Image (cartoon, rainbow, N blue to C red):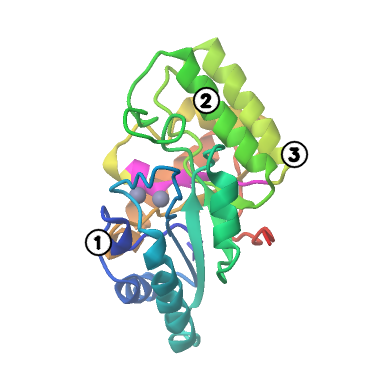
Amino acid sequence: MRANYHTHTFRCKHATGTEREYVENAIENGIKILGFSDHTPYLFSDEYSTHIRMKMGELEEYITTVLELKREYQKDIEIHVGLEVEYFSDFFDELYRELEQYPLEYFLLATHWYRNSHKTDPYFGIYTEEGRILDNYYQQAVEGMKRGCFTYFAHPDLINYPSNTERYKQTMKKVCRVANQYDVPLEINLRGVRLGKQYPNGDFWKIAGEEKCKVIIGCDAHTPDELDYQVPYEQAMEYVKKYNLQLIEEVTFKPWK
Ligand SMILES: [Zn+2]
Ligand SMILES: [Zn+2]
């Protein structure tokens, strides 16, 4: 694995490890390009703040820390700083304006929560047969990709909706087509493999293969150890072979300012 662009830090409150520990583990595992993409802070209108992301006040230090390591380790590894960002349409524009002041290099698109992740809005990973939840997942994914600022789409198959249904298949076919139209690679997520989550979902990757989508593999490391990618990587490669996926190893960051 030459490049991994999906890495968290302790700042998001559900990952552990300092940026330096991730860098050293990446080098140890032979990774040449390491991108940090911790969960973005979000500016919700009522200052609702979740337990799974850093606060806006921590963003500057996150970026500075990564950029210092980038200089320090430049002979050993190429380091980049970005964020993993949900497309919550009610709040995205304000967030974007705020983020513009920072030297962030890239964004990964992620769909984690129904609507705006407020209070009772469920996590997309909870099993559901409700069409409105699938529809909102689709909407966030597609509207997000159409903004043109996302370098790739992380775990696009996170939603836990019956994937053997025609409704799922038609929806995901459209997601894949928009990904192609806007040149957004789709990520096979190694954390999902590692933890035996509902993703990677073979039904999704079959469609992505038929649609000839660009595919990238990401560690989604929430501990420095999760950069030791060998075992889940081999399993991910089985999907790549089985569904004839167009694997890419590196990405070009989408300009976003
Ligand atoms: Zn996370
Ligand atoms: Zn992530």
Which dot marks residue 136?
A: 2
Residue displayed at 60% across by 61% down: 250
* Cα distance between the residues tagged 1 and 2: 31 Å
The residue at which mark 3 appears reads as: 181
- The part of the chain drawn in magenta is 184-193
Name the spot of residue 106 as percent of width and height, x first. 58, 61
Badge 2 element: helix
Q: Is residue 101 magenta?
A: no
Name the spot of residue 230 as percent of width and height, x first. 36, 57
Q: Foreground mark, 2 or 3?
A: 2
Q: Does residue 146 lie above or below 97 as drawn?
A: above
The residue at which mark 1 appears reads as: 16
* Cα distance between the residues tagged 1 and 3: 36 Å
Q: Mark 3: give few (<14), some (14-19) or many (20+) Cα within 10 Å.
A: few
Residue displayed at 49% across by 25% down: 203
Q: Does residue 214 lie above or below 222 as drawn?
A: above
